[in-house]
Image: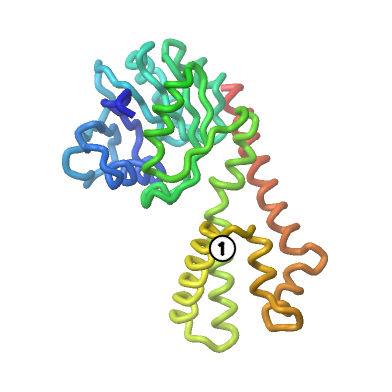
Amino acid sequence: MDRFQNILLVGCGNMAGAMLTGWLAGGIPASRFTVVDPGRDGLPEGVTLLRELPAEGRFDAVLLGVKPQGLDDVAPLLAPLLGRETALFSILAGVEFDSLAARFPAVGALVRIMPNLAAAIGKSPIALDARGLDEIGRADVTALMAPLGTPEWLAGEHLFDAVTALAGCGPAFVYRFIDSLAAGGTALGLDEGQSQRLALAMVEGAALLAGASEFSPGELADKVASPGGSTRAGMNMLDAGGALAEVVAEAMTASRDRNAEMAAAARKA
């Protein structure tokens, strides 16, 4: 991690902002970070905020935090700042290494990162792949990402569409399920606010237990569901015809396919 002493964030919206929050909470000094974002206010004390890209400067790492559709606007201005000593980190969904290399040909290393908003509390899965990094460089990236959650190096870039559907889009699916659980409780007669609190507490506890357990989530589900009991009656509805597994698979496939479409559009640009 000592390799990355001077980090530039180009764009600091929801995801890049969550990463910045996680890094600062993890003890990385605010003085290491410079943010370029014309619409951002209220950054933590010690973080340098710029409204536009500097004309010159040396950065060990640059994090692309703009929207994918904004890449071509920022690339000509950013490219002169990226030399052989710089690692370019990209959290842009669907923007592949070849597309990044075409826009930033002089950069020393390219790192694709797929986190989610739980990076702010150090609980994000973080999928990684890189070009131009040796094993020491990868170890440095792993150390930098560790305060944000659980870094996982992928076997290849082709897996980013799948991991985006699972770890990137997945939190939204979980939030939808929590909302549905709360709505179900309300439909059964609970106060709406109370049902929401119970649903959140239940999911938080279940997730923490699953993370600490020696058993898989499927095994835990069967341990909760006694034969002939109330839990089993509900699970029978979810399991009937593979209904739950099917709708989740369809949602993930739609997310994966959309990510692939965005990658194809970026290649053509």
Residue 258 image-quadrant placement: top right
| Mark 1 surroundings within 10 Å by alpha-carbon count, few (fewer than 14), some (14 through 19), many (20 or more) | few
User: Which residue reaches farthest bottom?
Assistant: 189
* Quadrant for the C terminus in the image: top right
Residue depicted at 58% across the width and 65% down the height: 177
| Residue underneath mark 1 | 176
Instruction: Name the side, left or right, on which 118 lies relative to 81.
Output: right
User: Which residue reaches farthest right?
Assistant: 241
Instruction: Name the side, left or right, on which 53 lies relative to 229.
Output: left
Residue depicted at 49% across the width and 16% down the height: 132
Q: Pick whichever, 248 or 259, lies toward us.
A: 248
Q: Pick whichever, 175 or 210, lies toward us.
A: 210
The location of residue 240, given as percent across then percent down, is 80, 69
Q: Amino acid at mark 1?
A: Arg
184 lies above or below 262: below
Numbered disc total? 1
The location of residue 178, given as percent across then percent down, is 54, 67
The location of residue 113, given as percent across then percent down, is 48, 34
